């Protein structure tokens, strides 16, 4: 059984027991988080239930393991022949979540 959920503007295919890294959800580590934007659910029999846009009554629950930051990316802007150069960095806050149930 698996589900496709949407969080942080991205879609993830999850199964029970999977550990995924998603954008910060605002829940402290050790607490439970519920994803209610479930786009599709496939049962053990192989039947796929696709929502329009979400599956009614479906939800995925998980436990937040920890909060961490991703690798730093460098954002560099330049316009040639104009002496314009800007360098910025960005580190995204992420949560590591273990999927506990698909209902």
Image (spheres, helix red, strand yellow):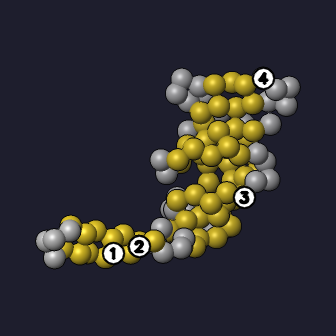
The residue positioned 52% from the left and 27% from the top of the image is: 53
**x, y (%) of residue 35?**
60, 45
Q: CA distance from mark 3 to mark 4?
A: 24 Å
Comes first in the chain, label 1 or label 4: 4
**What SS does tag 1 mark?**
strand
Where residue 43 sits in the image (x, y, percent)?
Answer: 79, 30
For the residues labelled 4 and 2, the Cα–Cα distance comes to 44 Å
The residue wearing badge 3 is 19
Residue 88 badge: 1
Residue 76 location in percent, x, y?
A: 33, 71
Q: Residue furthest left?
A: 82
Measured as percent of width and height from the top left, residue 14 is found at 71, 46
Give the residue at mark 2.
Answer: 74
Q: Which residue is mark 4?
A: 47
Residue 59 visible in rendering: no
Which quarter of the rendering shows the C terminus?
Answer: top right
Front residue of this view, candidates 22 and 58: 22
Separation of residues labelled 2 and 3 (CA atoms):
27 Å
SS assignment at label 4 = loop
87 displayed left or right of 6: left
**Quadrant of the rendered image containing residue 67:** bottom right
* Tag 1 near tag 2, CB within 8 Å: yes
Which of the 4 image quadrants contains residue 82?
Answer: bottom left
Residue at point 62%, 54% (across, down): 33
- Look at discs 1 and 4 and give the one toward the viewer: 1
Mark 3 secondary-structure assignment? strand
**Residue 49 makes an appearance in the image:** yes
Q: With respect to residue 6, does 89 lie above or below?
A: below
| First along the sequence among labels 2 and 3 | 3
Residue at image position (70%, 32%) is 41
Q: How many marks?
A: 4
């Amino acid at each position: 059984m698996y589900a496709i959920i949407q969080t942080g503007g991205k879609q993830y295919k999850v199964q029970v027991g999977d550990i995924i890294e998603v954008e910060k959800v605002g829940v402290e580590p050790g607490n439970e988080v519920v994803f209610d934007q479930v786009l599709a659910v496939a049962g053990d029999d192989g039947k796929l239930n696709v929502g329009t846009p979400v599956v009614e009554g479906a939800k995925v629950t998980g436990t937040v393991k920890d909060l961490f930051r991703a690798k730093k990316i460098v954002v560099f802007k330049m316009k040639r022949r104009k002496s314009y150069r800007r360098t910025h960095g960005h580190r995204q806050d992420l949560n590591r979540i273990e999927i506990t149930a698909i209902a």
